[in-house]
Image (cartoon, rainbow, N blue to C red):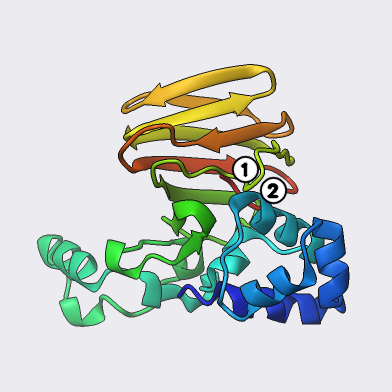
């Protein structure tokens, strides 16, 4: 599920943009873009987000599993257990319902994920046709940041985060917030922001990003 480089290359070719032009607009070297497309390097969160904006794709597309895939993203064990507990015939659990393309149930073993530079991981928790919304679990390794040069990024929409464990330093505009387990935040994503894990253990959080032109979260 993590063939990010090949998907980025496919969307770049589909857009008609050359590798050099994409590199120029993102302000990175062509060789770095080539390494990402060939799976030899991973982009930072900010670089991935810049790619998504320029290629006009959402994070849902970059995760690589389409909403139309439907039941393949569901959890057989959970669905069968639910069916049995409700007195339904387990053999009919996989029959598509009229709402199948609007329902997403994802088992932890089936989550699509994106592994990025510096130990940042996104895991998609659900996928519906609403591409302007991203519902994810995020992990930041100790010292990991959302950019590789400390420059803050911004995008359309709003985002909300909840820290499950560890610590997250969130710089939003001129304010710096140190979030610990059970603390949360919400903010206008058009305000320049940067995330960093200043702790000694992985930071795990639940993130929800939405916006008319939103392509991803941090």
* Residue in the image at 71% along x and 60% along y: 52
How far apart in space, not on screen, are marks 2 and 1 (Cα)?
6 Å
Asked whether 149 or 205 is in front, the reply is 149
Q: Residue furthest top?
A: 175
Q: Answer few, some or many: residues within 10 Å of disc 1's Cα (few below 14, many 20 plus, some between 14 and 19).
A: many
Foreground pick, 50 / 109 = 50
Provide the residue designation for mark 2. Answer: 214
Q: Are marks 2 and 1 in contact (CB under 8 Å)?
A: yes
The quarter of the displayed image where residue 123 is located: bottom left
Residue at left offset 55%, top offset 50%: 134
Which residue is at a point 78% across and 71% down the rendered structure image?
A: 30
Q: Secondary structure at mark 1?
A: strand
Quickly name the residue at label 1: 210
The residue carrying pointer 2 sits among few (fewer than 14), some (14 to 19) or many (20 or more) residues within 10 Å by Cα, namely many
Quarter of the picture containing the C terminus is top right
Decide if residue 7 is in sight here: no
- Which quadrant does the N terminus fall into? bottom left
Question: In the image, 129: left or right of 135?
Answer: right
């Amino acid at each position: 599920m993590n063939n990010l480089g090949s998907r980025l290359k496919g969307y770049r070719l589909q857009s008609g943009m050359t590798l050099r032009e994409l590199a120029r607009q993102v302000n990175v070297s062509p060789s770095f873009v080539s390494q990402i497309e060939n799976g030899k390097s991973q982009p930072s969160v900010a670089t991935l987000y810049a790619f998504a904006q320029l290629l006009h794709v959402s994070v849902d597309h970059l995760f690589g599993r389409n909403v139309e895939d439907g039941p393949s993203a569901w959890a057989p064990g959970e669905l069968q257990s639910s069916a049995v507990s409700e007195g339904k015939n387990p053999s009919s659990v996989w029959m598509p319902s009229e709402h199948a393309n609007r329902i997403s149930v994802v088992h932890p073993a089936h989550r699509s994920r994106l592994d990025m530079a510096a130990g940042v991981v996104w895991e998609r928790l659900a996928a519906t046709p609403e591409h302007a919304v991203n519902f994810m679990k995020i992990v930041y390794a100790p010292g990991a940041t959302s950019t590789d040069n400390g420059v803050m990024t911004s995008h359309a929409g709003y985002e909300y985060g909840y820290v499950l464990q560890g610590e997250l330093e969130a710089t939003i505009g001129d304010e710096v917030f140190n979030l610990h387990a059970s603390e949360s935040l919400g903010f206008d994503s058009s305000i320049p922001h940067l995330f960093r894990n200043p702790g000694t253990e992985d930071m795990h959080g639940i993130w929800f990003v939405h916006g008319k032109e939103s392509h991803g979260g941090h």
